[in-house]
Image (cartoon, rainbow, N blue to C red):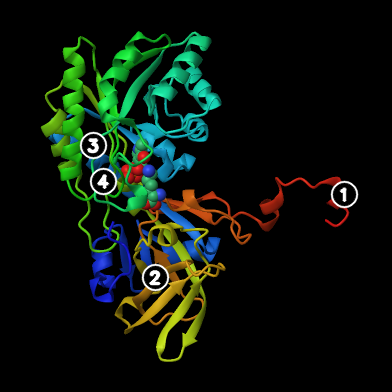
Amino acid sequence: MADTAPPTDADPTLAELLATHPHLQTDPTCGLVFEGVALNAIADAVGTPCWVMGAGTLRHRLRRMQAAMQAAGLNVGIHYAVKANDHTAVLSLIGEEGHGADIVSGGELARTQRAGIAAGRVVFSGVGKTDAELEQAISLGVGQINVESAEELAIISAIASRLGRTAKVALRVNPDVDAKTHAKITTGLAANKFGIPFADAAALYAHAASLPGVQPVGFATHIGSQILTAAPYRAAYARVATLVRSVRDSGLSVEVVDCGGGLGISYRTEAEGQPEALAGAIRAELGDLGVRLAIEPGRWLAGPAGVLLSSVILRKEQGMAAPFLVLDSAMNELLRPSMYDAWHGILPLAPQAFSQPTELAHVVGPVCESGDTFARDRLLPRLERGARVAILDTGAYGSVMSSTYNSRPLAAQVLVEDGRWKVIRHRQTVEELWQDETMPSHLAGHA
Ligand SMILES: Cc1ncc(COP(=O)(O)O)c(C=O)c1O
Ligand SMILES: N[C@@H](CCCC[NH3+])C(=O)O
């Protein structure tokens, strides 16, 4: 994710952004259209900021991912990474399309159950699962728990034994492979907190086979997110394949390999990661092992399927320098630019905006942090107070990373499908900001 300090000449033009986002079109009368719905119509009815998720785009990408695996002759289970976008409507769609889920908390597990995804199709990952979360998962019979340490293996064995259950576990191995992504979202380096050191994995697998309450079924690995080339996948999966062979040579059975590592998308001008390349890496390194395979994509499926609608609160002139366009959305909605210096495309909603002359502008939010900046020196048509924009590729790690910082209520969410749209989360009210607070009695008189 080469996202930092963008020189402007590296930016795609508005027309190029449209070309790389086929679910978006411009219409001369209603402006920017998303999966057949005018985004202005949604903003008129619901207001801004507003997340819009396109069910058609999500379905299309799920099917493309599955087709790439099948074309490579692989039978790969897709476990959608719930953390990318955990709305129950999104999870229901994933279940409806026949896929499972990858979760990292009891909350995510509860959401999958609410959405009707069978517990047997859920894989529980994460470096620190609480006892309560493990009890919940084991009682529900989740398909697989990816174990991230020797300590956790002992805890799972004890909890499952106490419950009279046998938990299917895979050991998540840290392959110590550089995924060539942003430092904050790499997961497969030895220095990262995730997974079991490669050198310890075979012995721990044998130990797992001797423990009560757990059945080791295979290995998992994960090297990071926003991966754009096949080489890191091949390096990681080659290491896992070595492990599978050596464990089998010792007489133990290995049935499953979970091939983690999130394919990247095209935020700026980078070429999108190709499911076919991922499938090729899996087939080349693991295809002849006779194991059940699984992947756990989040961003690649959901990212391009969402936009964040915002309005310009005001245009703050800076003399000869680029103006600040202050939006009504901020880092509390979309954290990625502040957190990772991430670049997101910004398109105006107005009809004809694409044919107007452009200027350089800084696009910021109203939150009291200088890091509350969506874009610096961005080439956009002149946008006045009240103009609306769509911030692109925000379907993954967008709404889920929102907060109410600065007492800003959570934005509304809308789902578009087949030319229709529906509110799937109402805009939080100001009163809802404090509805779960309780007041110490000696202060209550002032409230
Ligand atoms: C264990 C695990 N699974 C799945 C994912 C989803 O990754 P992505 O959204 O890049 O596909 C992540 C995030 O990096 C992860 O850590
Ligand atoms: N939140 C990150 C991705 C983290 C992936 C989860 N391990 C992002 O927005 O890019």
The numbered disc on residue 263 is: 4
The quadrant holding residue 24 is bottom left
- In the image, residue 225 sits, relative to residue 169, either above or below, namely below
Q: Quadrant of ligand 1?
A: top left
Label 3, on which residue?
66
Residue found at x 43% / y 23%: 151
Residue found at x 70% / y 45%: 436
Mark before the other along the chain sequence, 4 or 3? 3
Q: Residues within 10 Å of mark 2 (few under 14, many from 20)?
A: many
Q: CA distance from mark 4 to mark 3?
A: 14 Å
For disc 1, does the CB lie below 8 Å from ligand 2? no
Label 4 amino acid?
Leu
Mark before the other along the chain sequence, 3 or 1? 3
The numbered disc on residue 442 is: 1
Label 1, secondary structure: give it.
helix
Query: Looking at the image, do the residues carrying marks 2 and 4 touch, with CB atoms under 8 Å apart?
Result: no
